[in-house]
Image (cartoon, rainbow, N blue to C red):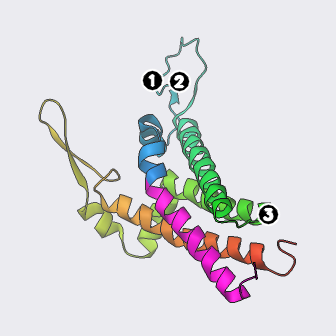
Amino acid sequence: MPRLPLNVERLALFGTLLSVFGELHPACDHWVQGSKTASRKRLYGEDLVHADGSPATPDSTRPTMTTSALGRRAVACHVASYTAVQLGATLAITRAFGYRVTPTALLAGAAINASTHAAIDRGALLLWLAKKTNKTGYIEHCQAARVDDEGVVTKEINGPGSAWMELDAALHRVIGIGAAAVTTWLTTRPGGRR
C-alpha cells in the first residue's frame, strides 16, 4: 500500500487522536470515575481522616492521613483510570486502522493529558485560571441546585450542571488538542516510526 503524503497522514492521525482524547473525556469523568473519587478529589485541609474519609479521633488505631492527602489520593486514582482507558482506546483504534503510534509519542500525549487532568481536577488551578480570566462570576452564578431526601435545597459550586463543570471540560478539551498535536508530531517526525 502506498504511503500517504506526510501532511495527509498527520491530519488523519491528529483527527483520530483528537476524537479519542476528546470523546473519551466525558466517559472517563462520568462512567469510569467512582462516586467517592469524584466527591473527594477536591478535598483540602489538615484534619486527620481515615482512608474511607471518616474523621479520625485521637484514639484511632487505623491509619490516618490529612484531608489534603485523601484529596490527592482520589485525584490520582481518577487520573490513573482515565489514563489507562485513554491509552487502551488510542492503541485499539489506531491499531484497528493499521496505524502504529510510537510508544514515546503515546506516552507523551498521555502524560500531557494526565498531568493537566490532575491539576485541573484538584480545583486550585481551575479557580486560579477563572480569576485571571474573569470567570469567577460565571462559576458563582451558575451553580447546581441539589435536593436531599428531606426536600432541603442546597447549592453546589462544582458538580454536574455547574459552570465549574463546563469550564473543567473546556480546559480538558483544549489541552487534548495540544496532546494530540504533540503525539502526532512525535510519531510523524523524521525518524519517528522508523
Q: Where in the figure is residue 174, as x and y percent of width and height?
A: 51, 72
* Mark 3 or 1, closer to the camera: 3
Q: Does 53 sit above or below residue 118?
A: above
Q: Residues within 10 Å of mark 3 (few under 14, many from 20)?
A: few
Q: Earlier in the sequence, mark 2 or mark 3?
A: 2
The residue sitting at 67% across, 57% down in the picture is 91
Q: Amino acid at mark 3?
A: Thr
Q: Amino acid at mark 1?
A: Ser
* Magenta stretch: dominant secondary structure: helix
In space, the residues marked 3 and 1 are separated at their CA atoms by: 41 Å
SS for callout 3:
helix
Q: Amino acid at mark 2?
A: His
Q: Marks 2 and 1: in contact by CB < 8 Å?
A: yes
Give the labeled residue for mark 2: 50
Quadrant assignment for the N terminus: bottom right
Q: Where in the figure is residue 177, as x and y percent of width and height?
A: 56, 74
Quadrant assignment for the C terminus: bottom right
Q: Marks 1 and 3: in contact by CB < 8 Å?
A: no
Q: Earlier in the sequence, mark 3 or mark 1?
A: 1
SS for callout 1:
loop
Q: Residues within 10 Å of mark 2 (few under 14, many from 20)?
A: some
Q: Where in the figure is residue 26, as x and y percent of width and height?
A: 43, 56
Give the labeled residue for mark 3: 104
Q: Is residue 54 magenta?
A: no
- Tell me if 61 is positioned left or right of 47 in this view: right
Q: Which residues are magenta?
A: 1-26
Give the labeled residue for mark 1: 54
Q: Residues within 10 Å of mark 1 (few under 14, many from 20)?
A: few
- Tell me if 85 is positioned left or right of 36 in this view: right
